[in-house]
Image: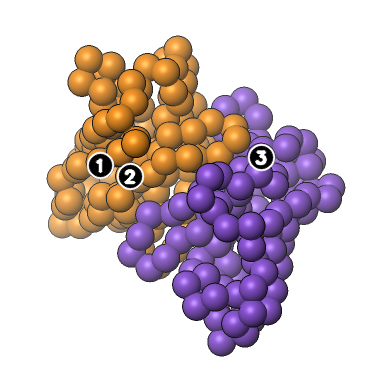
Amino acid sequence: QVQLQESGPGLVQPSETLSLVCTVSGVSIKNYYWNWIRQPPGKGLEWVAFISNSGSTNYNPSLNGRGTISVDTSKNQIYLRLTSLTPADTAVYYCARGYRSGYFDWGQGTLVTVSS
Amino acid sequence: QSALTQPPSTSGSPGQSVTISCTGTSNDVGGYNYVSWYQQHPDKAPKLIIYEVSRRPSGVPDRFSASKSGNTASLTVSGLQADDEAYYYCISYAGSDSWVFGGGTKLTVL
């Protein structure tokens, strides 16, 4: 059974950098594709970033180059780094396993609030 | 990347059927058979209920069905039950390892 667990700082100051971790159990992350998806409070879902099993990445253009997704296969973890945060980045951030067909497994999400 | 268009809300009585539409373009919904649907209850993570336009993951009741015609995908929930009350989101692959999401539809079971 695949389990995903996101973790993060909770509260971040504007203009600072966010670092999130998704810890995966039940499968080896090197065999699958991974994504970060976010959901602002009371709003819909938004794709953030993607990384393939070969390490290729892609990002939502709305991030304007502020995002970096990476993995550590030895720790079975996926990371998201988001710089120059603004209140508009306040959201629940989910990691999810999947590719073109759909997102088959999701974490429970971690709330990130950008505020001074 | 423009978002997919879903109706903000829909409703139905127990036992009835409802259909939720998801309209995109030839660059996403119409161009790939990679539309998926998700159910999200309040304060919960989304759950995949349909993938590759019309396929159901193991454990998803056959009351959930879906299809696609041109640039519009549709999700039908039959035999409505109280627990079906949730938000439903469509997602489409848009090529070059990118995705577009629908804005979500709130399904109310009356």
Query: Which chain does the residue under circle 3 lie in?
Result: B
For the residue pair A115 and A81, the one nearer the viewer reads as A81
Query: Please, what is the three-letter code of the amino acid marked with disc 2?
Result: Gly
The verdict on a common chain for dots 3 and 2 is no
Cα gap from disc 1 to disc 3, whole angstroms: 26 Å
For the residue pair A92 and A34, the one nearer the viewer reads as A34
Q: Quadrant of the N terminus of chain B?
A: top right
The verdict on a common chain for dots 1 and 3 is no
Q: Any idea which chain is the purple one in this picture?
A: B
Query: Which chain does the residue under circle 2 lie in?
Result: A
Task: Please say if the residues under marks 1 and 2 sit with CB atoms less than 8 Å apart.
Answer: yes
Which residue is label 3 attached to?
A: B52
Which residue is label 2 attached to?
A: A107
Cα gap from disc 3 to disc 2, whole angstroms: 21 Å
Q: Tell me which numbered mark, 1 or 2, is placed earlier along the sequence.
A: 1
Query: Please, what is the three-letter code of the amino acid marked with disc 1?
Result: Glu
* Residue B95 visible, this orientation: yes
Q: Any idea which chain is the orange one in this picture?
A: A
Which residue is label 1 attached to?
A: A6
- For the view shown, which residue lies furthest in the top direction? A54
Cα gap from disc 1 to disc 2, whole angstroms: 6 Å
The x and y percentages for residue B29 are 72, 44
The x and y percentages for residue B85 are 50, 73
Looking at the rendering, which quadrant does residue A29 occupy?
top left
> From the viewer's perspective, is residue B105 above or below residue A102?
below
Looking at the rendering, which quadrant does residue A72 occupy?
top left
The x and y percentages for residue B99 are 58, 39
